[in-house]
Structure formats: structure tokens, C-alpha cells
């Protein structure tokens, strides 16, 4: 439905803008170049649907926000149904339909499949979300990732943990790592195994527990954590399993000092707050987060609030932010190239240098492999069922609460 | 040692819940001999019903359970009458395709209407637990396990001691004989499919207290129910519970002693062993 | 004769198709041919010998992983790697078959056994560190050269490989049907007991069906690995893939030679067509396409439970096996 409404509404708005602003801005209105055609591929159905639809909300508001910033884009969105076969054909379709740059695809499997096509067709792919380190190691020349690899995520995540211990003067004795045994979970596990000993962490990691994210029941997993005696839990969840994990901790009265994820989805989703109520509070995710002090983030937030009054920008911020940024990166490159030719855009992407953007971190730029290495992370703690930046201090809007209060006395 | 007690107790409870999930599948296959590949989808549909009713009426799922079971009975009855009936006695792959199509429609219909996010029913006792000596038993799971036992017992009594139940059993044991003595097999099959679906409705309603409803959950539920029912014995009510408990406990122990992510490996290993050595299941009748 | 002429025309059309169509239809055609090929391979077991497998993703996955690992570690070209890939998959198939047939696991129970082994293997690969575990296995992407032996090159290379594989599998299964073994399979499919009574070695014939089917399927897996360059146990061994493999031959017409090909065309075009139509009318809400797809499956299986090809063949006036 939204797909039908969008173009007509956009035309309407543009029409109104053209009519209304013609007197005020005659030159700008007339001198419009043809729009850049961006093809977006996301998993809006299938098992990745919640995240795919969250990203899509970023896509839906992007044309308007980009137009306010002086970029004209036309968006064609497709759903790859969380199915890698379809990711590939849909990418071909978008390019055949004239997409000059692709954006996607939330999941590493789908993203690699699309990358093959983009490479063949010499059409750039700007990745919104996908953390598998291999994607930028496979030798693609047309793939650009404005998203951290799982190694970067974990490195930043662990550093922020140390910062939090320092800020609160509380250090846990022993930690346990529990992760979903899926693509992202195992990548995190490898990164933790590699990085933990090198970062001089103030606590010891007693064990790492892998679980099946599709398991019906996580009681044994939690019993194992509890039995380890760890007072600090590092988690990498997929989505809904985060709810089950916390619920089980409450039921088994397992009270660690803190529950922290080094950047996984799950603990900042709306369903997490709906499902757990007050028990969702004080859990922490260390991940890239929008810089709410940046004007462009405000703009994006306003557009989001107008378009999706039912959703909270503060909750969708991660997916929406990165998806929007990917489109911004593409539009910016096209503008600098002065061209909508895919090869010219790819060339321009290599010299991307965007200082004003949504997510925290330095300027957006890509190394020779197409990876942006300047993405920062923030400590985002759930306070009053709202993801709240508590560290680093310069971006924080509240103080970190650590150790977290016990489960008792809270309400679902 | 205490921790083992906890693990085994939680395995038993989880296992009984698995049994609950599988009962409906067992009823249908035991009699109609059709493998209901839309089992998980129907369960999830029941979960959504419970969620909708909890949201609009503020009703505890335990109260809406009879209503949802009745609704699912009607769905099952109609499904059998209008779709499955003409596939009775046809090759298995055709039945499979039919129910696969039904499952695709239900799953994506739910996605279309309610979206992909997990839906949760909040009840006051959601986080309570019983303290039994050194053990902590999750209240909701105890309720669900109790319901599983009660349902299985009820079904057993129904099939054993009522005329209708006996007639249905006759169809299952000897279809030709049942037809000869003048039983209306088509009606009995439809009733059985309805009863099986009513059980699915009841279990779905209880499930929503433990697991959030998402469309994608259906796929896993179907597969799990199959494992439970095959291991326990198709058509056997006690078998579903025994199969469930066996899987629950072995998964719990495997998860605790080895890695939790390996625990379904043990369920599949168990399934393979049972299929090879005792294909009628642990509690099934040898045919 | 008419059937052969029609097949010849279709093959000729497919041969020259890349010259006439764009990249997107070509990608769709590759997908169609890939699933047609897998359907033919599955059909040998189910359509000819009557053995229901719901776990064929196992052989796709084994073929893909073996060939990909050999290429990544030793630079073994895909065409050579296909040999050990097929050997591994065939051994797996024979193992499952031997267990199942010796222990008299039949029908739905055998199907569940195949699911159990496929899932079992998926979980094993999820934990196997040297093939990347659940974080997946990736092949390096190479630029600018085409090498048929190594299966490296542009989509058009993969198109012709897929076309060649499908045509070869079609011809091979046509030939197999006319051997003693082929007749033995048909006899077993209709009635295993009377086949045994009339002197057919049921066990050996069934094992042969499993061997042929799993070997062919694993070659499809090799194709998958080099076409996509990355694989995850969760996707390649998934139950969803096993189901997808069997849809085309069942919808097309089980046990017919042309059924899997027709079914693959119909289903893939149905999926892509529905997506395009929904987009055109602005109704592309997530899930809508699949609901329509499910309804279409329902209608087909209600109206033509034996598949589309037997019916179409009658309408065209060609032999049902065509």
C-alpha cells in the first residue's frame, strides 16, 4: 500500500513545492537535474522481516529529507523475502530497471549475493547493515560499506565497557559470553576470542555459551550462566530471543551486575520493550547510534515522526540511521561526480568525505577495500523503556546505571 | 548436584510443553493418517487469536482458551471437509503439497495483517515461580505442563470411553471394517480433524504465555511437533508426552553438559534412532 | 516425434535466449534452470522409484561445501572438485538409504528420516570451524577472466552451464528410464512387493536411485557455490530449500521427464510475475506475494493433483513422458 501512496504523494509535494516556491526560488526549482535512481533491497518478509521493515522506514522518509538537502533521488524498493536466491534476481531486476546505485541488504548472506551482481554490472552497492568481515575482504571493487565489521563492533563495544566501569567505579569480577549461534553471533564470538585477551579487560571471561536462536526454550542456557557465577553477561542475540533470554533470567532470579551486547540487534527493538516492560530497563547495547545533536539527525527524526507517528525514531534509529546514510552516501557521490553513471558514482564513492551525517563517528570515507573505518559506538542503555545514550560522555543524555538494579520490584 | 535437579526439572516441564504442542498433530495423524504440515501455522494462528482477545477484551488467555479451541475446531472441521477430504488415500506428496500451500497462506496472511514483530500477552503471573525445596519452577510452565497432562488424559478418556471416541478409533484401526458397519467415516474424519485443531488451539493459547507470537515461529513448531510425535508414537496421547519429556530432558542435559547450540542435534539424533529401531514410536502400536 | 520437435524448439530457444533478453530475465532463467535441474535429480528418487525425500538440501549443501572448500584451499577447479563433491554426497545418500531400506522405513517415515539427516548435518556444519561454521564460507571474487573449468566468469557462463546441466540430466533420466534399472524402479514405485516377487532386487534398485539422485543433486550444489560465492549452513541445508526443490517436479508432474522443467518455469515465473504485478498496482505489502503464491499452489494441487505436464501433454497431443 505504502508503495502506491509514496510516488503520488511525493509528486504532490513536489508539485506544491514547485508552485509555492516558484516565486521565491525560481532558479533552484527550474534547474533540477534528473533524479538519481536508487534501488533498495531489504528482507521485508521472511525471518528477517522485523529488521527489514525497520530499515524500510528509513527508505520511506529518505527522498524528502535528501531533497531538503539538495539531492534529488528516486527510490525503487524491493523485498528479497530473506531468501538469498531472490536477493540476486531482485538485484538484477533493479539494475535492469535502471537503478544507478543499490542499497541493502541488512543481512550478510543477502548482501554478498547482491554484491556479486553489482560487481558484474559495475553498479555500486552501498551497504546499509551487514557486519560479516569477509564481505569487504572478498575483493569486490563496487562494494562500499558504511557499517562496522563485527570485529570493529566488538573492539568498540569492549572499550566502552571499560569506560563504563571507570565512569561508575564498579568493575565486575567475572563475565560470561552468551551468543546466538548464527552468522552474526559466531562472527562476534571469533572477534571476542581474538580481541578479549589483547584489550587488557579488567574482568575475566569464564565461558562462552552458544545457543540456537530458534530454540523454543532458553532455560538451560540461563541456568548455565547462573551456575558459572558470572556477575556480568555479554550477549549477542538475534531479535526475539533477547526477550526470551531476559525473561528467563528474571524467572530464574539471576541477577548479574550488567547485561551488555557488543552491538547485536534485539535489546533496542520495540518488541523488546513491549515484551518485557520494566524488565527491559538497564540492559545495554554498545553500538553505533545516531548523534542526536547533529542537525541532520533532527531533520531525519522530524520526517520520521511525521511519516510514522506509530513508531519511535529513538527505537528505529539504528536501522533508519544507517539506511538513510547509505542513501545519503550514494546521492552525495552522484552529486560530486556530476553524473548518474554507475561507474562515475563508484569512482566518486572512493573519495567520499562526508562530515555532516547521522551516526556518531568521524567523517564517512572508504578505504581501498570499500570499508568505512571511522564509525564510532555509543553505550545505549534502556532507561524508562527508551534507548538512551549514556556514554561516551560528550554524546550522553543520561548517566550510566551500573550495576543495574535487581529484577525485584520491577513491573513487566 | 542441586543444579542437575534444576536442569532435569526444567527439562521435564519444557518437555511437557513440547508434548502439549504435539498432541494435536498426533490426534490427526493417528486417525486421518494425514500429516498436517500446517500444524505450526495453526498453532501460531491460535496464539494471535489469544493475543487479539487479550488486547481487545483484556482477557487472560486461560479464560479465552475454550473460545479459541472452539474456533479452531470449526477451522479444522471445515479444512477437512473442503480441502483435505478429497486427498484422503492419495499419495503422500499430494497431501504434503496441499497442506504446504495452506501453511504458506496462513503464515504470510499473519505477516500481512499483523506484521513481523513479536506479539506478547502480559499476565500478572508471567514472571512468578513456585519454590519447591531448592528448586524454582516457572509458574506459567507448570500451568502449561499441567494442561498438557489434563488434555492428554481427557483425549485418552474420550477415545476410550465415549461412543464417538470409540467410533473414531474404529476408523483409525480398521477403516474398511468401520465402513462396513456403517460408520459415517467422512463425518468422523472431519470431527477428528476438528478435535485435533481444537487441541492445537488450546496449546497455542497456552503457548502465548511462554513465547511471543511471530509468523516465523510456525515453521519451527511444525518441525518440533513432528519430532516429538514420531519419537512418542503417532496417535498415542501418552506417547506425545513421553516423547516431549524425553526430548526436553535430553536437550536440557545436552545443553548443560555440552553446548546449548548443539541440543537440537540430540533431538534429531534421537529421531533418527527411533525411526530406525522403533518406527512406530516408543508408545505407538506396532502395525 | 512431436514431443522431440517441441523439445528441440525449446532447447534452441533457450540456446539463443541470452542474445535476446536482458540481464534480469537471464538471472531468472538461471534460477529456473537451476531448480529444474534439481527437480529432475529429485524426481529420479521420488518420481521414478517412489522414495520420498524431504531432505535434498543435504546433497546441495555437501556438494557446495566440498567443491568450494577444495577450490579455496587447493585451487582445485570446480569441474574437478565436482567429482569428490559427488562422491561425498553419494556416500551420504547411500548411507541414509541403506539405513532406511534395511530398517524398512517407508513413506512419510523415510521422508522424516531425510529431514532429520539434513537438519543434523546443518547443525554439524554450524559448528564446524574450518568451513566457517555458521558465519559462512566465502569464495574469493575474481575479476575479468572467464574460466569454464573453474566456473569463474560472467552470468552468461553460468547460464550455459545451467542449461547444459539441465539438458544433460534430462537426457540422462530419459535414457535411464529405458534401462532394466528404469523399469525396475517403475515396478517398485507401483508395488514393491510384487516387484520383489517377480525377481527385482528392490534394495539394490532403490540404492541405485538414491545414488543417482544424490550425485546429480550435489552437482547442483557445486553450481550454487560458484554462482553465489558464499554459503551459510542455515541457508544451504535449510528445510526451506528442500521444499523448494520438490515443488517444481510435483507441480510439473511427478515421474514425468518434462514435469520438473515445466514446474520450475511455472513456479518461478509465478513468483516473479506476482511480485511485478503487485508492485505495478502498488500492493506490494510484505507477505502479499507469498499469500498469492500459496493460493496458486493450492489451486494447482486441487485441480491438477498429478501435476501440470500430464494434462498439458494431452492437450498438446504428445506422449506424457515427452
Image: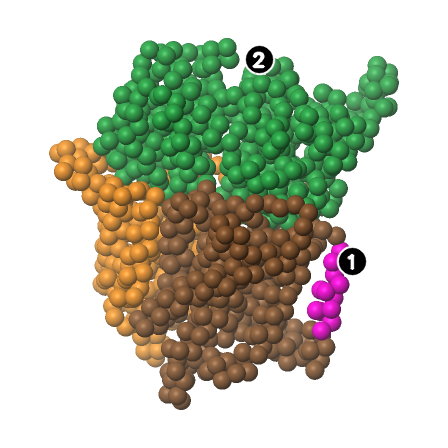
Chain colours: A green, B orange, C brown
- Confirm whether the magenta stretch covers residue C9: yes
Q: In terms of depth relative to the viewer, which is nearer, C61 or A231?
A: C61
Q: In terms of depth relative to the viewer, which is nearer, A139 or A363?
A: A139
Q: Distance between the residues labelled 2 and 1?
A: 54 Å
Is A155 drawn above or below residue A298 in the view shown? Answer: below
Q: Residue at x 42, y 20 (%)?
A: A159
For residue B125, which quarter of the picture?
A: top left
Instruction: Give the x, y percent position of residue A394.
Output: 50, 10
The secondary element bearing badge 2 is classed as loop
Question: How crowded is the residue under tag 2: few (<14 C-alpha within 10 Å), some, or many (20+)?
Answer: few
Q: Residue at x 30, y 22 (%)?
A: A203
Q: How many marks?
A: 2
| Residue B207 visible within the image | no
The secondary element bearing badge 1 is classed as helix
Q: In this view, does A24 lie to the left or right of A97?
A: right
Instruction: Give the x, y percent position of residue A377.
Output: 49, 21
> Furthest residue to the bottom?
C198
| Residue A16 visible within the image | yes
Say which chain tag 2 marks. A
Q: Mark 1 points at which residue?
A: C20
Q: Residue at x 66, y 21 (%)?
A: A353
Which segment did they paint magenta?
Answer: C8-21
Question: How crowded is the residue under tag 1: few (<14 C-alpha within 10 Å), some, or many (20+)?
Answer: few
Quarter in which the N terminus of chain B is drawn: top left
Dominant secondary structure (helix, strand or loop) of the stretch shown in magenta: helix
Q: In terms of depth relative to the viewer, which is nearer, A22 or B102?
A: A22
Q: In this view, does A123 lie to the left or right of C228?
A: right
Q: In this view, does A225 lie to the left or right of A342?
A: left
Q: Name the residue under label 2.
A: A293
Q: Residue B11 carries which label?
A: none
Q: Is residue C169 left or right of residue B168?
A: right
Instruction: Give the x, y percent position of residue A35.
Output: 77, 31
Amino acid at each position: 500500500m505504502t508503495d502506491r501512496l509514496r510516488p503520488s504523494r511525493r509528486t504532490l509535494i513536489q508539485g506544491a513545492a514547485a508552485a509555492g516556491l516558484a516565486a521565491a526560488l525560481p532558479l533552484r526549482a527550474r534547474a533540477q537535474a534528473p533524479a538519481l535512481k536508487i534501488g533498495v533491497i531489504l528482507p521485508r518478509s521472511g525471518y528477517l522481516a522485523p529488521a527489514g521493515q525497520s530499515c524500510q522506514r528509513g527508505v520511506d522518509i529518505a527522498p524528502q529529507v535528501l531533497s531538503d538537502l539538495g539531492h534529488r533521488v528516486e527510490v525503487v524498493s524491493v523485498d528479497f523475502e530473506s531468501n538469498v536466491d531472490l536477493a540476486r534476481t531482485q538485484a538484477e531486476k533493479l539494475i535492469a530497471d535502471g537503478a544507478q546505485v543499490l542499497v541493502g541488504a541488512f543481512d550478510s548472506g543477502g548482501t554478498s549475493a547482491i554484491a556479486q551482481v553489482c560487481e558484474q554490472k559495475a553498479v555500486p552497492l552501498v551497504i546499509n547493515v551487514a557486519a560479516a568481515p569477509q564481505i569487504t575482504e572478498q575483493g569486490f571493487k563496487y562494494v562500499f560499506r558504511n557499517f562496522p565489521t563485527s570485529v570493529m563492533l566488538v573492539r568498540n563495544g569492549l572499550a566502552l565497557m571499560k569506560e563504563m566501569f571507570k565512569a561508575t567505579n564498579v568493575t565486575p569480577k567475572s563475565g560470561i559470553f552468551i551468543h546466538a549461534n548464527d552468522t552474526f553471533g559466531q562472527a562476534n564470538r571469533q572477534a571476542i576470542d581474538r580481541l578479549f585477551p589483547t584489550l587488557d579487560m579488567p574482568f575475566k571471561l569464564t565461558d562462552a555459551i552458544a545457543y540456537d536462536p530458534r530454540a523454543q526454550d532458553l532455560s538451560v542456557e540461563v541456568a548455565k550462566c547462573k551456575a558459572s557465577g558470572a556477575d556480568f553477561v555479554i550477549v549477542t542475540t538475534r531479535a526475539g530471543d533477547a526477550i526470551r533470554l531476559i525473561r528467563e533470567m528474571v524467572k530464574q532470579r539471576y541477577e548479574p551486575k550488567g547485561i551488555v551486547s557488543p552491538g547485536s540487534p534485539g535489546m533496542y527493538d520495540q518488541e523488546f520493550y513491549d515484551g518485557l516492560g520494566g524488565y527491559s530497563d538497564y540492559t545495554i547495547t554498545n553500538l553505533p547510534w545516531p548523534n542526536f545533536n547533529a542537525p541532520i539527525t533532527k531533520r531525519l527524526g522530524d520526517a520520521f515522526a511525521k511519516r510514522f507517528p506509530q513508531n519511535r525514531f529513538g527505537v528505529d534509529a539504528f536501522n533508519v540511521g544507517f539506511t538513510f546514510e547509505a542513501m545519503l552516501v550514494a546521492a552525495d557521490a552522484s552529486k560530486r561526480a556530476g553524473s548518474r553513471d554507475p561507474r562515475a558514482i563508484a569512482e566518486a564513492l572512493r573519495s567520499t568525505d562526508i562530515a555532516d551525517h547521522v551516526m556518531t563517528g568521524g567523517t564517512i570515507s572508504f578505504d581501498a577495500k570499500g570499508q568505512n573505518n571511522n564509525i564510532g559506538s555509543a553505550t545505549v542503555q534502556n532507561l524508562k523503556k527508551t534507548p538512551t545514550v549514556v556514554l561516551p560522555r560528550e554524546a550522553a543524555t543520561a548517566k550510566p546505571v551500573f550495576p543495574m538494579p535487581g529484577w525485584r520490584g520491577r513491573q513487566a | 548436584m542441586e543444579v542437575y535437579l534444576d536442569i532435569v526439572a526444567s527439562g521435564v516441564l519444557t518437555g511437557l510443553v513440547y508434548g502439549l504442542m504435539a498432541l494435536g498433530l498426533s490426534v490427526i495423524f493417528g486417525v486421518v493418517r494425514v500429516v498436517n504440515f500446517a500444524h505450526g501455522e495453526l498453532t501460531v494462528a491460535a496464539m494471535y487469536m489469544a493475543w487479539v482477545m487479550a488486547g481487545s477484551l483484556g482477557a487472560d488467555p486461560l479464560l479465552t482458551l475454550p473460545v479459541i479451541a472452539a474456533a479452531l475446531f470449526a477451522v479444522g472441521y471445515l479444512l477437512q471437509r473442503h480441502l483435505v477430504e478429497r486427498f484422503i488415500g492419495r499419495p503422500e506428496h499430494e497431501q504434503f503439497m496441499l497442506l504446504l500451500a495452506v501453511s504458506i497462506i496462513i503464515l504470510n496472511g499473519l505477516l500481512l495483517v499483523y506484521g513481523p514483530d513479536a506479539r506478547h500477552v502480559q499476565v500478572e503471573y508471567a514472571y512468578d515461580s513456585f519454590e519447591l525445596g531448592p528448586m524454582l519452577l516457572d509458574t506459567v510452565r507448570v500451568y502449561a505442563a499441567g494442561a498438557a497432562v489434563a488434555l492428554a488424559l481427557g483425549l485418552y478418556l474420550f477415545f476410550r470411553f465415549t461412543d464417538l471416541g470409540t467410533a473414531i478409533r474404529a476408523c483409525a484401526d480398521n477403516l474398511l471394517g468401520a465402513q462396513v458397519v456403517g460408520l459415517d467415516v467422512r463425518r468422523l474424519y472431519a470431527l477428528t480433524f476438528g478435535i485435533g485443531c481444537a487441541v492445537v488451539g488450546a496449546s497455542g493459547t497456552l503457548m502465548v504465555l511462554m513465547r511471543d507470537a511471530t509468523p516465523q515461529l510456525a515453521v519451527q513448531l511444525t518441525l518440533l511437533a513432528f519430532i516429538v510425535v514420531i519419537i512418542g508414537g503417532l496417535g498415542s496421547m501418552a506417547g506425545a508426552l513421553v516423547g516431549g519429556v524425553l526430548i526436553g530432558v535430553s536437550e536440557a542435559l545436552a545443553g548443560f553438559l555440552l553446548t546449548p547450540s548443539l541440543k537440537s542435534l540430540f533431538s534429531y539424533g534421537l529421531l533418527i534412532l527411533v525411526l530406525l529401531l522403533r518406527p512406530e514410536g516408543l508408545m505407538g502400536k506396532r502395525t | 516425434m512431436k514431443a522431440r520437435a517441441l523439445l528441440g524448439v525449446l532447447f534452441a530457444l533457450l540456446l539463443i535466449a541470452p542474445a535476446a533478453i536482458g540481464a534480469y530475465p537471464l538471472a531468472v532463467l538461471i534460477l529456473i534452470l537451476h531448480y529444474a535441474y534439481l527437480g529432475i535429480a529429485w524426481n529420479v528418487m521420488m518420481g521414478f522409484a517412489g522414495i520420498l525425500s524431504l531432505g535434498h538440501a543435504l546433497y546441495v549443501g555437501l556438494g557446495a561445501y566440498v567443491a568450494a572448500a577444495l577450490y579455496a584451499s587447493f585451487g582445485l577447479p570446480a569441474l574437478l572438485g565436482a567429482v569428490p563433491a559427488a562422491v561425498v554426497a553419494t556416500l551420504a545418500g547411500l548411507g541414509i538409504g541403506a539405513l532406511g531400506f534395511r530398517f524398512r522405513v517407508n513413506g512419510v517415515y523415510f521422508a522424516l528420516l531425510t529431514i532429520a539427516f539434513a537438519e543434523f548435518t546443518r547443525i554439524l556444519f554450524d559448528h564446524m570451524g574450518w568451513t566457517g561454521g555458521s558465519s559462512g564460507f566465502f569464495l574469493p571474487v575474481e575479476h575479468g577472466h572467464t574460466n569454464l573449468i573453474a566456473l569463474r566468469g560472467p552470468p552468461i557462463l553460468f547460464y550455459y552451464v545451467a542449461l547444459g546441466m539441465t539438458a544433460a540430466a534430462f537426457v540422462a533420466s530419459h535414457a535411464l528410464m529405458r534401462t532394466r534399472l528404469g523399469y525396475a524402479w517403475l515396478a517398485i514405485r507401483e508395488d514393491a512387493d510384487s516387484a520383489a516377487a517377480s525377481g527385482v532386487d528392490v534394495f539394490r534398485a532403490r540404492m541405485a536411485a538414491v545414488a543417482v539422485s544424490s550425485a546429480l543433486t550435489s552437482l547442483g550444489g557445486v553450481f550454487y557455490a560458484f554462482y553465489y560465492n558464499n554459503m551459510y549452513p542455515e541457508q544451504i541445508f535449510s528445510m526451506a530449500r528442500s521444499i523448494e526443490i520438490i515443488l517444481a517436479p510435483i507441480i510439473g508432474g511427478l515421474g514425468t521427464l518434462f514435469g520438473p522443467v515445466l514446474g520450475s518455469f511455472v513456479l518461478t515465473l509465478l513468483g516473479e510475475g506476482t511480485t511485478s504485478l503487485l508492485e505495478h498496482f502498488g500492493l506490494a505489502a510484505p507477505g502479499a506475494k507469498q499469500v498469492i503464491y500459496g493460493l496458486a499452489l493450492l489451486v494447482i494441487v486441487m485441480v491438477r493433483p498429478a501435476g501440470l505436464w500430464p494434462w498439458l501433454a494431452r492437450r498438446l497431443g504428445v506422449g506424457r513422458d515427452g
